Image (cartoon, grey):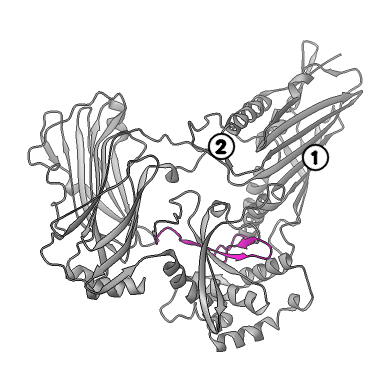
Amino acid sequence: MKKWIFFLTVGICIANITTAQSNNYFQDLWKEQPELHTTTSDAPFTVLNYKVVRDFNVTRKDRSYRCFQYKAIYKSIKVNTRQGADSLHQIMLSFEQNEELVSMRIRAINAKGEVINLDQQVRTIRMPDSRKVIVVRDFGLAPGWEIEYELIMKILYDLSGSDYLQSTTEVENASFQLIAPASYSFKVKPTGGLPPATDSTSNYLRFYTVSARNLAPLVYNELFYFLPQLQRVDFSLDQAIEQKDTVRSSWQHFGQENYIPYVSISKPEYKQLEKELKRWGFLQKPMPLPQLIYQVEQYVKSNYTIVDPVYTKETFDIISILKSKRVEKAGMVRLLSGIYYLLNVQSQILLMSSRDTIPLVPDVVVGEVPKNILLYFPQVQQALAPTEMDSRFPCYPSIWSGITALRCRDTLIGEESKVLTDFITTPVVPYTNSNITLEATLNDWNNPSWEVKQSFGGYPAANIKAAFTNSENNQENKNKILNVLLPFQGGSRRPSAIQLENEKFTNIPLNKPVLLQSTLSTPNLISTTDGQTKLHIGELVGGTMSTALQIPPGDLPIQLSFPYYQEKRINITVPAGLRLTNINEFNTDINDPALGYKIKCTQDGQQLRVFIIEWYKNADITGKSKQSFKAIQQKVSQLQKLDMVFSK
């Protein structure tokens, strides 16, 4: 990237090109006397036009301030119904840290065709992370009105990007256009079924265009990550030619520039780090490699504090970090990478996005996408998140797992060290590791009190440990966590004799589960009417979480946070002479290669036993397995409402 910055800042001089000027991009759309549009849609409102322009013809002055492109957006919206008018009461536009607003104008057109200027209602809010949000509210819209806005911004440092064309609202006309000097070539990749980009040149300029009509809305569903499914256009500068100079973009170059600062540690830093490691008593005894990786991460994250970077580099320099115990995120990567190197533990750097946003695409170098980092250990094929203080090996944030990552490592070729890059899929913790078990026993029918044993491993354990570790021994916070973990709704049980074990991050690895034992009094559990006795057990059998029956349509996947396995054993001593009359409703077997659910209920005299097993092998559920998932959800929903009915 540094080479790109120098080349584009100093070396390029192109004459007779059109540079970005406010209000020049959409003259055919933004008219002095606008005409109202007609629609036949019964949707609350319709996006009439959505246009995005990326312009790489940057003025010398702006280029000197590291502005590499302009971005212009035009959007017009037609209000169709009263519901649409009531719901469209504000517009919020967020800007990334490298985006600077140049100009904006916004107006409404009422049903009579009269223009209402809304520029004075624009407000700017600065967020805690230094990003800015523009808010425009109180339009006072009515059915038949239209609202349109146009904005132009400068994009700093970036030679690539991604633009969404689809949204939750139908779009009649959408287009993306990239304008650049003719000596530039770009990779432009539309996604989600958008047509391919056209490439043309005219008057020393190059144009890439993607156009689409009547884009259907993507309806939000909590069962899949929304943003990656939206139709969008990814683009990146492939090469730029100026006289005899040619510069090309590649993930190899990107990986090298990001990798080297993390692993380039000076000799004084290494010497100080060696002294520090000799003080760590737990390193003096041999242990399995996974345990060593965990112990180092646990010690560092328990004794060092993540802070914002400082201009003196004290939070980046390892010698200063060891003294102050304060470290910025980049410094934490350097620190952990250096420690594992000294311990002869091979580690590599993975750069990637996350499952809920734009994915890393190997053939388009969008440098803003891989914002997250993992240390990957090829000997065990697992990873840790050095900058995430609430995660522990091997359970880094699950939203980063199972996706494409750029792997960076170095090797010696002759006497020269070279950085190697390739693409791999971030490791996924096996579903059997993220296990949840429950055993509940009811022996006294007249005094319905349950003895409950629960265990949590893998990701459930990591999440619980993070919650308890951050509770700071506050009893109210602890009670809130327990209220989520214990079976039955809070109002239908009275817990006592609660015992927790391994509920915080310690030297004990995540392969040892969190244990929770409790006694739960459920006085309203049993009722008798008309000669029938009912045991209100639905919340124990089916759980208390709401079930999702709205399965994503078409090829859209069902996306779980992580693969997992759950098992329940329920033991009940029934009074002599009582038989479970609806036992068949507590017996189901749903089989699928990717997931499964089984509930088996048996009664032998006074002993009633219920066994439940539920498992999801993969985080993404596709194809015919989606219907199996729906069948499980329907069965669980039924069980949550179901009573056990007994009669003599």
Q: What residue does disc 1 label?
A: 439
Quarter of the view holding residue 117: top left
Quadrant of the image containing the C terminus: top right
Say which residue appears at 65% left-offset and 84% top-offset. Answer: 274
* Near-viewer residue (160 or 284): 160
Considering the numbered disc 2 on the image, is that residue within a helix, a strand or a loop? loop
User: In the displayed structure, does residue 46 sit left or right of residue 438?
Assistant: left
Point out residue 174 in the picture as x, y percentages from the top left corner. Answer: 27, 40
Please indicate, yes or no, whether residue 46 appears anywhere in the rendered image. Answer: yes
Disc 1 residue crowd, few under 14, some 14–19, many 20+, Cα 10 Å: some
Q: Is residue 430 above or below residue 40?
A: below
User: In the displayed structure, does residue 134 sit left or right of residue 310?
Assistant: left
Residue 620 falls within the magenta-colored stretch? no
* Near-viewer residue (204 or 105): 204
Considering the numbered disc 1 on the image, is that residue within a helix, a strand or a loop? strand
User: In the displayed structure, does residue 559 sit left or right of residue 612?
Assistant: left
* Near-viewer residue (359 or 34): 359
Point out residue 188 in the picture as x, y percentages from the top left corner. Answer: 33, 52
Point out residue 360 in the picture as x, y percentages from the top left corner. Answer: 45, 55
The first of marks 1 and 2 along the sequence is 1
Quarter of the view holding residue 293: bottom right
Q: Is residue 485 above or below residue 236?
A: above
Three-letter residue code for mark 2: Thr
Q: Which residues are magenta?
A: 367-391
Residue 376 falls within the magenta-colored stretch? yes
- Alpha-carbon distance for marks 1 and 2? 32 Å
Q: Main secondary structure of the magenta part?
A: loop
Q: What residue does disc 2 label?
A: 622
Please indicate, yes or no, whether residue 328 appears anywhere in the rendered image. Answer: no
